[in-house]
């Protein structure tokens, strides 16, 4: 019976348009272009509404891959899931993580147990007035289940990270909704990023049975007791639908990788980071033959303005947004424990882990 082989390649970049590392791996035969399913990246932009580095990075990757796949750049973007997260504050290092998937005849010798698997799905396009509301929650939940099936995962407990790229509002999109007689969740483009991220995360929680399905518009960005322990959502201007990528472990996978996760209670929760590392044999007493590939985490400024009883000023800084502060803080913490700044830390963790915290997932390579 055929098995699925998943590959994970972390490649550093010298700028958002740098595709040289990826192309070198393709030329060497390390990566087969037709097997690329998703590319997650960290770019050195501001992570805000006007962060052009995200779209620039996707455009550069699509242009480079188009001749390899004998497709147009637009067709490449439709075929591969691209999720670019802006903001590499502090010691965070710009990089991309390439996920490949292909069928093989038989598993590698010595392989046993569940191994890393990846699945992808899309929602249909949303109307501007649907962003941050129950329609986005419901459709995201459906897409998560479809991505689980695509990954060969049936048990929600085997899902360890769900990465979603979701839309945001612009003035034109708000005006279009108003012209139809409808109001959007907010008229602020920046605030809409949080609404879209939050609704998408709640969709993950519904799909995985982490919360009940009877939630509505008024719960988004209000009921912070409702959250997913594995959701990571990132909003951008370049799309109007949700791209859903499910990462977990499956018995149908013949991958040499394994994924695990934990949940940070706040921005300085080093114990949770160590628990995530330990879940794949990379803790304080690492198992032999295991190598860290990458860490994926969400960062959030605690909405009550404090961390463990002490006031912080992230929410009151008019020069630097709180998401940038949070990425730098959480990125520094994880980098110190992992020994590398080339990690994927995304800001804005609304309904992604408890308020002020967020999920952290680790992928390890297993040697045989």
Image (cartoon, grey):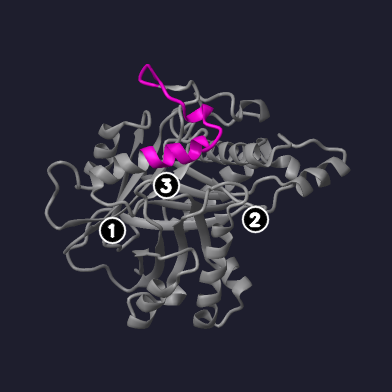
Magenta stretch encompasses residue 197: no
Q: Quadrant of residue 254?
A: bottom left
Q: Is 280 on the left-hand or right-hand side of 155?
A: left
Q: Circle 2 — which element?
A: loop
Q: Tell me the quarter of the image containing the C terminus.
A: bottom left
For the point 40% across and 67% down, the residue is: 100
Q: At which x and y percent is residue 305?
A: 47, 22
Given contact means CB atoms under 8 Å apart, are the residues at marks 2 and 3 in contact? no
Magenta stretch encompasses residue 310: yes
On screen, residue 126 above or below 321? below
The residue singled out by tag 1 in the image is 257
Q: Circle 1 — which element?
A: strand
Which is closer to the viewer, label 2 or label 3? 3
Total count of labels: 3
The residue singled out by tag 3 in the image is 89
Q: How far apart are the two marked residues, 2 and 3, measured between alpha carbons? A: 25 Å
For the point 63% across and 71% down, the residue is: 74
Q: Tell me the quarter of the image containing the N terminus.
A: bottom left
For the point 11% across and 54% down, the residue is: 288
The residue singled out by tag 2 in the image is 239
The magenta stretch is 307-329
Q: At which x and y percent is residue 362?
A: 31, 48
Q: Quadrant of residue 334?
A: top left
Which is closer to the viewer, label 1 or label 2? 2
Q: Is 9 on the left-hand or right-hand side of 41?
A: left
């Amino acid at each position: 019976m055929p098995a699925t082989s998943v590959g994970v390649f972390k490649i550093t970049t010298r700028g958002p348009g740098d595709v040289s590392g990826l192309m070198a791996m393709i030329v060497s035969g390390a990566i087969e272009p037709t097997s690329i399913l998703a590319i997650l990246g960290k770019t050195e932009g501001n992570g805000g509404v006007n962060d052009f580095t995200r779209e620039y990075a996707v455009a550069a990757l699509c242009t480079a891959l188009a001749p390899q796949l004998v497709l147009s750049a637009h067709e490449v973007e439709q075929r591969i899931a691209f999720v670019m997260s802006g903001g590499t504050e502090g010691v965070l290092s710009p990089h991309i993580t390439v996920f490949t998937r292909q069928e093989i005849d038989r598993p590698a010798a010595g392989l046993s147990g569940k191994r890393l698997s990846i699945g992808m799905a899309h929602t249909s396009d949303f109307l501007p007035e649907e962003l941050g509301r129950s329609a986005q929650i419901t459709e995201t939940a459906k897409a998560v289940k479809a991505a689980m099936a695509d990954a060969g995962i049936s048990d929600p407990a085997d899902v360890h990270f769900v990465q979603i790229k979701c839309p945001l509002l612009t003035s034109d999109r708000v005006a279009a909704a108003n012209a139809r007689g409808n109001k959007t969740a907010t008229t602020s483009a920046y605030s809409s990023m949080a609404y879209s991220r939050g609704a998408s995360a709640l969709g993950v929680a519904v799909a995985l049975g982490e919360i009940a399905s009877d939630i509505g518009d008024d719960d988004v960005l209000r009921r912070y007791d409702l959250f997913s322990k594995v959701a990571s959502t990132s909003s951008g201007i370049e799309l109007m639908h949700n791209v859903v990528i499910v990462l977990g472990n499956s018995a149908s996978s013949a991958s040499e990788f394994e994924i695990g996760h934990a949940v940070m209670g706040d921005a300085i929760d080093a114990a949770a980071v160590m628990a995530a590392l330990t879940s794949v044999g990379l803790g304080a007493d690492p198992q032999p033959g295991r190598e860290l590939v990458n860490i994926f985490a969400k960062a959030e400024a605690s909405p009550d303005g404090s961390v463990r009883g002490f006031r912080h000023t992230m929410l009151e800084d008019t020069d630097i947004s709180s998401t940038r502060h949070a990425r730098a803080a959480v990125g520094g913490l994880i980098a110190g424990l992992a020994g590398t700044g080339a990690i994927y830390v995304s800001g804005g963790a609304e309904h992604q882990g408890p308020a002020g915290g967020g999920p952290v997932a680790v992928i390890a390579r297993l040697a045989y």
